[in-house]
Image (cartoon, rainbow, N blue to C red):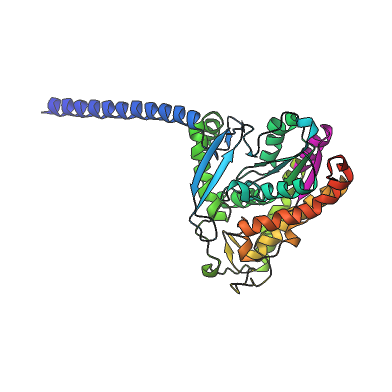
Amino acid sequence: MEIKIIDLIKKISKRILTFLAYIFIILIITIVILEIMFRIIKPYNLGLADGTISLVYSKKYKIKNFNKQLDDYIYFTKNSLGFRGEEPPKNFKNFLTIIVSGGSTTENARLTDDKTWVYILGKFISNDFNNAWINNAGFAGHSTRAQLLIIKEHILKLKPEIVIILTGINDLGNVERDRYIENIRIPNIVSKTFEILKKNSYLFSFIHYLNEQIICRIVGLGYRLNFNLETLKYLEINNIEKEKIKSIHMDKMNIFKTNLEEIIELLRENRIMPVIVSQSTLCGNVIEEKTKKDLSKIKIGLINGRLYEELLNLYNQEALKIAEQNNILYIDLENRLEKKYEYYFDYIHYTNAGSEKVAQIIYEGLSPLLNKEYNIYKKK
């Protein structure tokens, strides 16, 4: 009897092991197939892969919008450089060439090609200057670290006359992300293994991207296509908690400072003119004109609107300080763009009307520099 039971256990164990082996083989084959597919398809917002910036070239997308403030469909194009905008002219050195570096508020991935603020800015410049060419090197989620990589790997070799830098919001987001995941306990070996896979695999890079999108939504970043200002809840934060959160951001401000200073140094070494633009937000200590919503109390991820604006201003003030120390043009978009719901379709991303206003403000700040330093291109 005992022998039969032992034999039965052996047979069951063998079947289980065989089944698990099949599952393992199928899993490996599936991972390999998906990896090949991702290397061929390369989704445009894949982001970091193998430790460098992975761009998508010469692609056109038709994207459905679900926000009532946006066009139903938008047309999103990447040129041969991996940027948004016209192809580079053959006689590049004879043009007034400008590239804009930033995150999703620069990329404007929910606005059609000719309604992004970078495109409209290019039109303003072309009205007054000959041979003007501008490209949009904004990518969703890019902090100063990613901007530094984009500049090193893709922009420096082009040698544009000017690089406009809109930055700060994703560095803020990175700190908020870190605050959130500190409360999630992940075994160190799992974390390190996934980090290695992410850097060497397009599939795991995409999985990382999806995970980051979920975290972004939790901490108040990323596109909010179902955003409705009128239905947002309020959140109160006491002064002790507020100062604690601000001190965490100040403790990590050196990362932002070091990256931005390195960007400026690199550009200047390559005789490229840097221009810094402050990041703007709908949030702040005001009542929104149309909805009568108190923008200081609206809940944004883990914080409220007033603290969100105060944190963003820490980064904007640091950028201003760096600009002044390096005698660089600083365009204060945050304090010039009105906090109107018609200009934003969520906390930070612009509507068509907002995009046009942003372009106008930046051109007003940029035109004195263009008239002084690039007068050779000025239309008579």
Q: Viewed as shown, does residue 351 lie left or right of 37?
A: right
Query: From the image, which quarter does the N terminus lie in?
Result: top left
Picture residue at 43% right of the left edge, 31% below the top: 34
Residue at horizontal 21%, vertical 29%?
12
Q: Of 133 and 196, which appears nearest the observer?
A: 133
> Between residues 342 and 165, which one lies in front from this camera angle?
342
For image coordinates 66% across by 48% down, the residue present is 106
> From this viewpoint, which residue is outermost toward the front?
380
Q: Nearer the viewer, residue 301 or 75?
A: 75
Above or below — where is 279 with respect to 37?
Answer: below
Determine whether, in the image, residue 153 is placed left or right of residue 62: right
Magenta-span inclusion, residue 269? yes
Residue 331, position as x, y percentages in the image: 79, 53
Whether residue 359 is visible, yes or no, is: yes
The image quadrant that residue 303 belongs to is bottom right
Q: In this rendering, is residue 197 above or below 257?
A: above
Name the side, left or right, on which 112 lies relative to 7: right
Asked where in the image residue 347 lies, by quadrant, the reply is: bottom right
Q: Residue furthest left?
A: 1
Residue 5 in the image, given as x and y percentages of width and height: 15, 29
Question: Which region shows up in magenta?
Answer: 260-278
Q: Position of residue 77 (x, y in %)?
A: 57, 40
Can residue 184 be seen in the rendering of this structure?
Answer: no
Q: How many marks?
A: 0
Judge whether 294 appears above or below 67 on screen: below
Q: Farthest bottom residue?
A: 292
Q: Residue at x 71, y 48 (%)?
A: 123
Magenta stretch holds residue 154: no
Q: Position of residue 71 (x, y in %)?
A: 53, 55
